[in-house]
Image: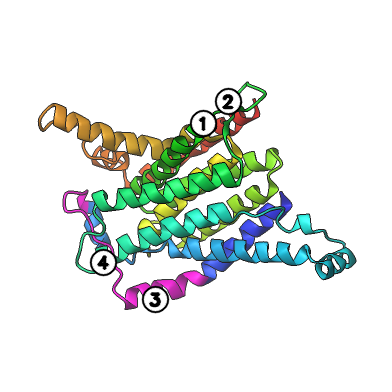
Amino acid sequence: MAQALFMGGLSFLLAVIWGPPLIRWLRANGVGKKIRIEGPRTHQVKVGTPTMGGLMIVLPVVILTLVLNLGNLIANTAAGRAFLRQMGWTGDQLIGRSILVPVAAMLAFGALGAVDDWMGTRGGNGLLARHKFPIQIVLGAALALVLHFGMGLRSMAIPTVPQKIDIGLLYLPIAVFIIVGSANAINLTDGLDGLAGIITATSFIAYGVIAYLQGQIYLATFAFIVVGACMAFLWFNAHPAQLFMGDVGSQALGATLGVVALMTGQWLLLPVIALIPVAETLSVILQVAYFKWTKGKRLFRMSPLHHHFELLGWSETQVVQRFWLIAIWSAMIGVALALL
């Protein structure tokens, strides 16, 4: 755990240092946020705030993880092992095993989100859902195949049941659903200053703890590297935000969270640990279904759910802080269930 926490702290420092130059570059290139006309009026002041801030998270995480894997490769050479023995270290203390699958998820979905963000800041509306969703399915399927056939993952853990249950090929569609669903859930949560970053960081902390308790030190380290980068992003995204995450961040983080959950085997707990993103997604689904069923009536004042509470009179900071308190509670419940 010391290694995981140290790498999380290092990730925070790297991302914080990288933040101001990124903001200046985004401003210089006119990468500004568009605001929904039908959204809360208080959000209109945010027009033009730099978006694609998720790059502040994705790049440090990817670079730091690849450096760790490179270190592991060096440590496994004869010269590397001799050097580490002289230093009193072992190769296992560096990383343990490859974590390239969640890195691949972060890069793939981050690239898709970057294209969407860039198109949206260049006079368009970004990628249409009917174009973006099939691409997400393809990416999710590729990751699911690697997890199942490449890493041998095919089971699920159920609280209070000692042994994991083998579900065979059923694992594949479930994994695709989790990865794509998580990517879109975090994307829907990204609507208020600090909300998506703090909720996602809390979820990664929970899965980092679960991974550590299961002996998956490599995965715990990766999770806390993501947490550190998210905390650095929040330094600049705290209300009033200097930049927004954009799809490059929300899709990358969401898909990666889904992959991490799958790699722990505790993916049944994802709806508990990520309770807020699940609630945000359900609010959109229910709003659309109710609107069509009643021919024009609304179940919520506005969806996703955070806008509903804004229109009820909660301030933006109240919504974020109260949602975060719920996220902490649900994360604790999720970790507790993983221990049963």
- Earlier in the chain: of badge 3 and badge 4, it is 3
Which mark, residue 33? none
User: Label 3, on which residue?
Assistant: 24
For disc 4, the marked residue is 121
Residue found at x 69% / y 48%: 217
Mark 1 highlights which residue?
268
Whether tag 2 and tag 4 are in contact, CB under 8 A, the answer is no
Is label 1 in a helix, a strand or a loop?
helix
Q: Is residue 78 left or right of residue 310?
A: right
Q: Quarter of the image holding residue 116? A: bottom left
Q: Is residue 321 above or below residue 249?
A: above
Part of the protein shown in magenta? 18-41
Of residues 6 and 268, which is closer to you in this image?
A: 268
The residue carrying mark 2 is 158
Alpha-carbon neighbours of circle 3 within 10 Å: few (<14), some, or many (≥20)?
Answer: few
Q: Nearer the viewer, mark 2 or mark 3?
A: 2
CB atoms of marks 2 and 1 within 8 Å: yes
